Image (cartoon, rainbow, N blue to C red):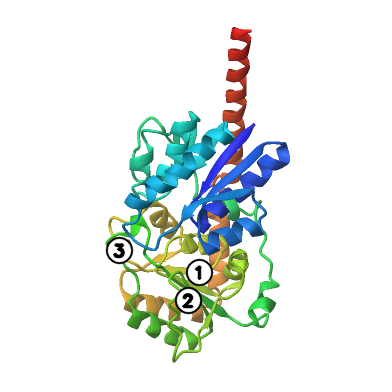
Amino acid sequence: MKTLIFTNTPAHVHLYKNVAKRLEATGYEVLVLARSDECTEALLSYYELPYETYGKRSESLHSLAWELPSHLRTIAPRARGFDPDVIFGKGPYAAAAGTVSKTPTVAVLDSETSFDHVIARPFVRAILTPDAFQKDLGRKHHTFSGVTELAYLHPDSFEPDPAVRDALGVERDEPYVIVRFNAFNGHHDVGKKGFSIEQRRHLLSELSERATVFVSDERSELVTDGTEAQPFDLHPAQMHDALAEAALLVADTQTMVTEAALLGTPAIRSNSFVGADDMGNFIELEEHGLIRNLESFDAVLEQSRTLLADETARETWERRRDEYVSGANNVTELLYEIAVTYCDSQQSSAATRAREVS
C-alpha cells in the first residue's frame, strides 16, 4: 500500500511529515516528490523522509506556465512507476500525477487567493480545507476545524525545545523578536507586496531598541545594516522551537504568522492581502485574538511597542491558543485516516478485480 506526497515548499514538508512517518510506521510505502530548493530539501533530509526532486523552484512570479511542462515530464513516469494508492498535494502537480496514474488525489488547501483549487478541482477526488475557507468548491469540498498548520503544531504533535535559546545565544529571560520577510515570488503573490526596504530598516531599528531581533528573509536580502538585528541562521527545522520562545513575531508573510499563533506567540501580520478580502484563516485567527492583521505600517510599529511592553501578553496568547486548539482537529490524524481509507479501498477494489478475472 503506497502513498505519494507532493511538497512544493518548506511549509508542505511540515504539513505532511508526521503523516508520512506514521504511514511508514504502519507499514505503508511513502514517496515524497519535491521541488528542489535548499530549504525544502534540508527539511526533507532532516526528517529523513524518502524523497526525490522533480525540478527546481524558480524565483519568478510568472514561472509556473513554462516550468509546468518540464516538471510534468519528470512527474508522470515516476507516478506511474510508483503506482500509489492515494496522492496528497496542492495544485497542478498532484492533480496531474493522479490523472496519469489513475490514482485518487486529495488536495489540501488553505488559501482562497491561490489558483491551486481552480487548477486541481477537475482532476482530484477531494479537496480538504479549513472550515474558515471562504469559497464553496462544490461536491468535492470537505472541511475541518482549525488550520492546516495543526498537522505539525498541534500539542499532540509538537513540543518546543527551550534549548534553542542556547543555539541562538540568548539568555533564559532575554526577550527576543523574530521578523520574517516574504519574497512574494509565488504564483499566488502576483500583485501583492509587504514591507518596503525603508520600512524593513525602520522596523528593525525600532524593535532592536526593545529586544534582541532575529531576521528571516526569504529573498536573503537582509537589511540589518545600521541596526543591531541579526540573521536567523539556525537550521530551518529549529524555527518552530525559536518561535515558541519568542516574545513577538512581526511578518509580511503568511505561514509563520499562523505558526506563531499556534505556539502561543503574539504575532503581527502586515501585507497587501490584509483587508476586507483577506483569507478566511487569518480572519478567524484574529477573531480568536491570536494575530493582529494590520494594513498600516505605523500601526505595526505601535502594536509592536505595545505587545513588547505588555508583561502579560504571552500568558494571554497561550490561553487563547489553548482555547482555539481545543475545538480544532488534529490534522495529522485526519490525513492519516484519509490515507488509510483510500489505500484500503484501492486494495479491496484490486482484490475484487482479481477475483473477477480468476
Residue 262 versus residue 124: which sits nearer the camera?
Answer: 124
Q: Are marks 1 and 2 in contact (CB under 8 Å)?
A: yes
Q: Which residue is mark 1?
A: 266
113 with respect to 46 (left or right) = left
The CA distance from mark 1 to mark 2 is 8 Å
Disc on res. 192: 3
Name which residue lies at 70% across and 72% down: 163
Q: Amino acid at mark 3?
A: Lys
Which SS class for mark 1?
loop
Q: Amino acid at mark 2?
A: Leu
- Horizontal and vertical percent for residue 356? 59, 8
Disc on res. 307: 2
135 with respect to 305 (left or right) = left
Quadrant location, the N terminus: top right
Q: Are marks 3 and 2 in contact (CB under 8 Å)?
A: no
Looking at the rendered image, the disc whose residue lies closer to the viewer, 3 or 1, is 3
Residue 62, compared with residue 301, is above or below; it is above
